[in-house]
Image (cartoon, helix red, strand yellow):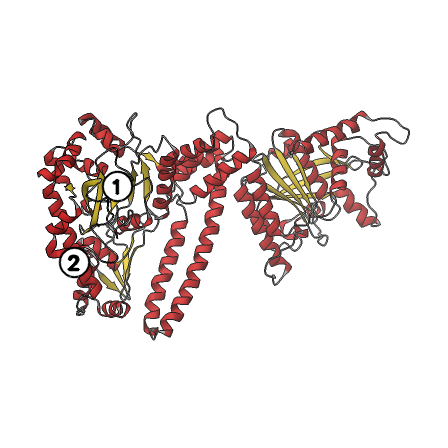
Amino acid sequence: MASELMTNIYEHLDRAALLAELGPRLRGQVYELTCPQCGKREAYLYHDGTQITCNRRNKCGYESSLWDYVSRRDGTDGRQTLATLARAAGVELPPPSRRERERATREQAVEMAVRVMQRLLFEDEGRETLSYLRARGWTDEAARAAGFGHYPRQEELRGYIGLVLEGAQDEAFSLFSPRALGETHTLAIPYRDAFGHARGVIVRSVRPDAPGPKYLFNRGVKRGEHFFHIDALPRGARRAVVVEGYIDALMATACGVEGVVAAGGSRITEAQLQEARRLGVGAFVLALDNADLDAAGREGALHAIRLIESAGARAYVARLPAPYKDPDELMRAGPQGVAAFRAAIESPESAASFASRQLMRKHGLTQGALLSKPARDALLDDAMAFAAHLRDPLAPADFFGPIAAGLGVPESLLSAELETRREREAAQARDAAYRALAQRITQYVGEGRAAQVDAMARETLSRIGADGARALRPYTLQHLRLDLMNTPDGLPTGYPALDALVTIPDGAITLVAARPSHGKTTLLTNLFLNQLRAHPGESFAFFSYEETRAALALNMINILAGETLSRAKNKYALKEYFTRFADAAGRPHPALDAAWKAFGEMVDAGRLLLFEESLDAEALAGLIVSMKRRDPRLRAVFIDYMQKIRWAGAQAPTRQVELQRISGRLLDAAKQANIPVVLAAQLGRPAKTSSAREDTRRGVRLDNLRESGDIEQDANVVLGLYNEAVDRAEDADGAPPAQDADQRLTVTVLKNRNGMTGFTVPLRFEPQTLRILPMARERL
């Protein structure tokens, strides 16, 4: 019945007349409106829709149903709002239902009971209750204005409200239960909803020895259905101050502080928050008891912040001066106490800063303290879970800054992990929203409401799009400052002439490209070891898709030692040497022993990480991000080589498309971890040209990246390697070049987003030791 009534109202609703104050102008199928929140002419409503949305999504974010807008604008409850919409649609409402009549009768009974209790407070019967208020600093005038009353003995109350007694009790509601009302608990406080309707009474004990809780609700009324005192919020209020105690909120009003509501405990509820949000409240200042003093206060404040921020509102925390434990106690200290309370709520701490400090206290991260690995992980898990609720674009900086400083890790690392989580959650939310939309369409068609599907689908898709836009964080000057502070300058290659031209950039892909047998793996390995030698406090990972870890480790020790045992078979000679730490003649070689020791020390310290597993692109990218999250020392990742990596997702139509997907996924990982990802890549062999320059650099061109498609587009830097000795030997008889003489290599800067390109740098290659060294006199 209700669904049919609302459908009828919305089908005939004169939206232009209903929203005249917003200056509606119909353009096509959409009403252009003045936004109720920001005042810009950028709000809209579909001609048959029910949702007002502001297009300034990242600046304003206003969104409201017609029902909530009218209710907030007119200050009306559900029945009154329905009547307004019905009039604008020319629809006659049915007579009140039995349930509505019972509710009206109950409200009448509660209102009469409240008036009786308020009168009794100032008569002989209420003497003890009034004395309690006076002892707490309440004047009679202030107590009367606050609406306090005295709950008499229950049989007396029944006599006072005999005319409406039927509405005061039924199966679900009773003003006469629990039994302690009027006996141990006598200070009555009306409990009203946002529209001032009396829903019941809250009754406090006035004797210190009274058993049970200090506050009781009459049966049928529950704490948390409404913020207490929410009916006293000024019309159009955008901010509410939240205290715990009911008397705290009334004391604030008595002292001239407006906009204070009470949660009725250390935790606010979703129902309270949703009602306040419907009234237009967008900011909440928490002035809860003991938020800085005990675990219960801390957890209550953190819970409130999570709820508020998740609802799209902003939370702040007022810090009360010591030694006052709650606002009531502070304001009862006199005019200075009231001034101190005003100052606390006018200049509150950001919720993010407060939460960061409390989580650090909870996990024992104090100045100078060192956390164990499990304790650090627990803190980070709590921090990430909490930060996911923060909606202010600057909040992560306030939140992660102190934690990062305490742990000694870059703040950018924590922020990157948060963005990854948010993107994953946003994708899941969109999927769920699309599935729900599909179900609603099926439901509408099944109910014979196919004509309404178009409007419903448009509004739903608009909301999904708006949620996605809000998930994108605006880039602020604060973000820029933090990025400049936290973004490293990149890595040098270890070759001075090459470093004068290029830097291996962070958060990006660098390619080392060469034709087969020209030394791309060897150059990649030398670059890797150059980093380990230049950055003794950091770690580096090498993923090989071609060689085993044992073979790769032996090559690295060979490079570190720089010593030749056999000009013909040096690698095999090294293998034999390290089985007994002596050469064929039984002689030790200190340089080899030192290289073995240096390699072992780097491995044992977790600085040199070797992997031989052939991971697919998704698993590899995920591992890179996970490794950086677990160990902030990870400075770069090297991979040999690009064309060996496989894509495990949906089958690509061509290998070229597959490689595009792989490079795109690795680029995402580099950005998330904010470290360089350096890959070897294979070049194809082109036909000879008549140009001597082309012959010298034959094949060292971007368009010769084998199967690459657009791999180079994802790379910030591409270095092309050329070994002339290999080229000459292949042209002569196809045999590899001699291994007993040094070879000349040239590295060409094929691409460099942050610098010059086209320049070549000569290097010297020692085939027996696998070392690549600068030329004696480097020239550009």
Task: Say which of 437 and 135 sits in front.
Answer: 135
Relative height, residue 385 to residue 66 (above, below) = above
Quarter of the image that includes the C terminus: top right
- Residue 389 lies, in percent from the top left, at 40, 45
Q: Which residue is rendered at x = 19% and y = 35% of the image?
A: 251
The residue identified by callout 2 is: 166
Image height of 86 relative to 155, above or below: below
- Identified at 76% across, 38% down, the residue is 555
Considering the numbered disc 2 on the image, is that residue within a helix, a strand or a loop? helix
Is 493 or 727 nearer to us in this picture?
Answer: 493
> In the rendering, at what x and y percent does residue 300 appear?
36, 39
Q: Which mark is residue 215?
A: 1
Q: Residue furthest right?
A: 585
The disc label shown at residue 358, or none: none
Question: Gap in Å between the C-alphas at discs 2 and 1?
Answer: 25 Å
Disc 1 residue type? Tyr
Q: Residue at x 56, y 34 (%)?
A: 373
